[in-house]
């Protein structure tokens, strides 16, 4: 009962933003991975799936389109970032045409999705990315060191009901795309994973050369 009440409270943009401030050690790792791993430029376009209130806009130097299933988050994002586009949308059912963006990204979203939803989001992200682009996933994972029980218990209290270990995350997304690169940053609250996914067909063609 208490957990459900807390989850409802976090649907409010102001509380969501406060939660982001509390989790700054993890957020800083998200920002580091975005800046070091996602190749963007002012002339490029990026779709951010599960954008929340749009905080990632500040670290993306590109034509940015954020989507989130929560309309309240999208309203807040539009108020805070007039230089970007935001749409309330289900990330597993994107309305964009094929090859609409140079890159796709998702931060702190996978642990809110069950396996079938995550596979669908991955497939949709890769569908809307142009050839040569990728789907970049950044999210907290269960600790790499199983002895770090505090980090595991802390993450399992999150309103996202599907925390995964790195190998579990890789296994699920690999049904829809090829993991071309992975990286993990350890942190005091969470370990944070980065996965770069490309279409399975593109990975197969590259391997055949």
Image: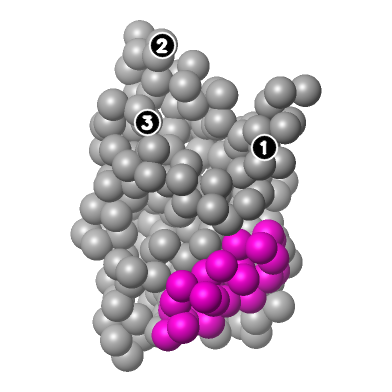
Is residue 203 something that shows in the picture?
Answer: no
State the SS at label 3: loop
CA neighbours of label 2 inside 10 A, class few (<14), some (14 to 19), many (20+): few
Residue 173 at x, y = what percent? 55, 48
Location of residue 94 with respect to 110 vertically, above or below: below
Nearer-N-terminus badge (1/3): 1
Question: 76 or 97: which is nearer to us?
Answer: 76
Q: Nearer the viewer, mark 1 or mark 3?
A: 1
CA neighbours of label 3 inside 10 A, class few (<14), some (14 to 19), many (20+): many
Question: 208 or 19: which is nearer to us?
Answer: 19
- The numbered mark at residue 7 is 1
Alpha-carbon span between mark 1 and mark 2: 23 Å
Nearer-N-terminus badge (1/2): 1
Residue 24 at x, y = what percent? 32, 42
Extreme residue in the right direction: 1
Asked whether the beta carbons under mark 3 and mark 2 sit within 8 Å of each other, the answer is no
**Which stretch appears magenta?**
64-89
CA neighbours of label 1 inside 10 A, class few (<14), some (14 to 19), many (20+): some
Residue to which mark 2 is pinned: 149
Q: Where on the picture, by quarter, is residue 127? A: bottom right
State the SS at label 2: helix
Location of residue 77 with respect to 195 vertically, above or below: below
Residue to which mark 3 is pinned: 190
Extreme residue in the bottom direction: 43
Residue 118 lies left or right of residue 199; in this view the side is right
Which residue is at a point 46% across and 73% down the rendered structure image? 80
């Amino acid at each position: 009962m208490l957990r459900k009440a807390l989850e409802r409270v976090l649907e409010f943009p102001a509380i969501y933003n406060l939660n982001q401030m509390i989790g700054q050690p993890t957020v800083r790792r998200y920002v580091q991975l975005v800046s070091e791993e996602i190749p963007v430029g002012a002339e490029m376009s990026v779709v951010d799936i599960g954008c929340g209130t749009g905080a990632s806009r500040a670290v993306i130097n590109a034509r940015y389109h954020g989507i989130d299933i929560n309309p309240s988050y999208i309203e807040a994002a539009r108020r805070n970032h007039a230089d970007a586009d935001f749409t309330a949308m289900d990330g597993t059912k994107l309305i964009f045409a094929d090859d609409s963006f140079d890159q796709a990204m998702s931060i702190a979203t996978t642990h809110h999705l069950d396996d079938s939803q995550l596979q669908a989001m991955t497939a949709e992200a890769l569908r809307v990315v142009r050839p040569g682009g990728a789907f970049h996933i950044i999210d907290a994972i269960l600790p790499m060191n199983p002895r770090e029980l505090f980090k595991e218990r802390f993450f399992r209290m999150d309103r996202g009901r599907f925390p995964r270990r790195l190998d579990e995350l890789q296994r699920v997304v690999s049904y829809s795309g090829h993991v071309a690169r992975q990286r993990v940053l350890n942190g005091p609250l969470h370990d944070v994973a980065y996965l770069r996914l490309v279409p399975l067909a593109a990975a197969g063609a590259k391997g055949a050369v």
